[in-house]
Image (tube, grey):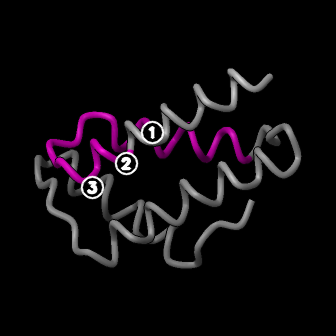
Amino acid sequence: MIIPKEYDSLMYEVAENFRTGNFALFEWELETLEEFVNNFYSAVERSGCVTLEDFTVFMDFLCVVKDADNEAVQNLITRAFMKSAEIRNKL
């Protein structure tokens, strides 16, 4: 899986902000998160599986964003779960 170069530092900031109740994201931050999710599922579809390392990074992402009181983030989470269901149904 290709992880966007901005992702690591962004997730540290997002986690800290979300922990304090600040769920606002700039558009470029949301785009980075969307790119991360898209890259994860592209890798899954391409190889038919996911490495433990990639799975762990993705689960860490979901853990950070799961309680976000932000419609755009909730939509991203919903799309991620829908994509997971779609892949599961193809198996």
Q: Is residue 76 left or right of residue 88?
A: left
Task: Identify the residue shown where x is 44% and y is 70%.
Answer: 32
Q: Quadrant of the N terminus?
A: bottom right
**Secondary element type, mark 3:** helix
Q: Residues within 10 Å of mark 1 (few under 14, many from 20)?
A: some
User: Residue 23 at x, y = what percent?
Assistant: 16, 54
Gap in angstroms between the C-alphas marked 2 and 3: 19 Å
Kindly identify the amino acid type of the residue bearing the numbered disc 3: Glu
Q: Is residue 43 above or below residue 63?
A: below
What residue does disc 2 label?
A: 76
Instruction: State yes or no: discs 1 and 3 in contact (Cβ < 8 Å).
Output: no
Q: CA distance from mark 1 to mark 3?
A: 15 Å
Question: Is residue 67 part of the magenta span, yes or no?
Answer: yes
Task: Name the secondary structure under disc 1.
Answer: helix
Q: Earlier in the sequence, mark 1 or mark 3?
A: 3
Q: Is residue 55 left or right of residue 64?
A: right
* Residue 46 at x, y percent in the picture: 84, 52
Asked whether 61 falls inside the magenta stretch, the response is: yes
Q: Residues within 10 Å of mark 2 (few under 14, many from 20)?
A: some
At x 21%, y 66%, the residue is 25
The disc, 1 or 2, on the residue closer to the chain's N-terminal end is 1
Name the residue carrying label 3. Answer: 16
Specify the segment rendered in magenta. 54-76
Q: Quadrant of residue 22?
A: bottom left
Residue 75 location, x and y as percent? 30, 45
| Of the two numbered discs 2 and 3 in the rendering, the one whose residue sits closer to the viewer | 2
Residue occupied by mark 1: 62
In which quarter of the view is residue 26 placed? bottom left
Under mark 2, the amino acid is: Leu
Front position in the image: 38 or 7: 38
